[in-house]
Image (spheres, grey):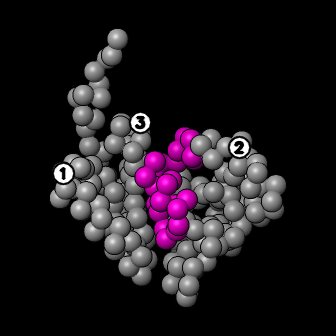
Amino acid sequence: MKLNQIVVFCASSPGHGQAFLEAAKEVGKVFVEKQITLVYGGGRVGLMGAVADAVMENGGHVIGVIPQFLNSKEIGHSGITTLIEVDTMHERKAKMNAICDGVIAMPGGFGTMEELFEMTTWGQLGLHKKPIGILNVDGFYDHFIAFIQHMVDSGLLKEENQKMILYSDNIEDLLEQMEAYEAPPVPKWLNIERS
């Protein structure tokens, strides 16, 4: 599957040290090399801004989607290809989902986790069949990956749904996995019509 537009969820903060910022710049550079349009939350700060800046500096295309209340606080990035303003956080995710071919989560906080889990849940319910990847920069997601395994070991998550999330510490490897991704079948109980 050719991935033309990918959503990147990541922090509106830069984090400690340089590893996260360097990874953000590398993602932007690779996206341009592979002619992938970045879709993201529209911010100009933190890792979000760093990814967008890297894409723009290398001659690529960026689509930002930002709620009005954040854009009005001058957090919106004015130097990207397209900035789409929406009313709510939910509309932001719905719009990003509508225009993307896949999702990558980089290091982030509560917002990144919420976005990642909602997109994964939508996939689990068969609302989309898009690949979802985690770029595990500097081991940031090691505990998260272990926790997902704990969900499986506890009988609360099916192994086939665990495999919906792809992992790598290398952006090019992650993109290769995403291009080869095949969504699991939707469970039959989700297809039953209810009266």
Residue 97 left/right relative to 62: left
Q: Residue 155 carries which label?
A: 1
Task: Kindly report the distance in space between the C-alpha atoms of the residues bearing marks 3 and 2.
Answer: 21 Å
* Labelled pair 1, 2 in contact (Cβ < 8 Å): no
Of all residues, the one furthest to the bottom in this rendering is 17
Residue 181 left/right relative to 42: left
Q: Is residue 169 above or below residue 66?
A: below
Of all residues, the one furthest to the front in this rendering is 154
Instruction: Measuring from the top left, give residue 187's x and y in whole percent.
Output: 24, 34
> At label 1, which amino acid type do we have?
Gly
Instruction: Measuring from the top left, give residue 117's x and y in whole percent.
Output: 43, 52
Query: Mark 2 highlights which residue?
Result: 86
> At label 3, which amino acid type do we have?
Leu
Q: Which mark is residue 127?
A: 3
Q: In this view, does 80 lie above or below 129?
A: below
User: Helix, strand, or loop for circle 3?
Assistant: loop
Ranked by sequence position, the earlier of labels 3 and 1 is 3
Q: Which residue is drawn at 23% across and 49% down?
A: 156
User: Helix, strand, or loop for circle 1?
Assistant: loop
Q: What stretch is highlighted in magenta?
A: 93-118
* Label 2 CA crowd tier, 10 Å (few <14, some 14–19, many 20+): some
Front residue of this view, candidates 99 and 195: 195
* Labelled pair 3, 2 in contact (Cβ < 8 Å): no
Is-magenta flag for residue 109?
A: yes
Ranked by sequence position, the earlier of labels 3 and 2 is 2
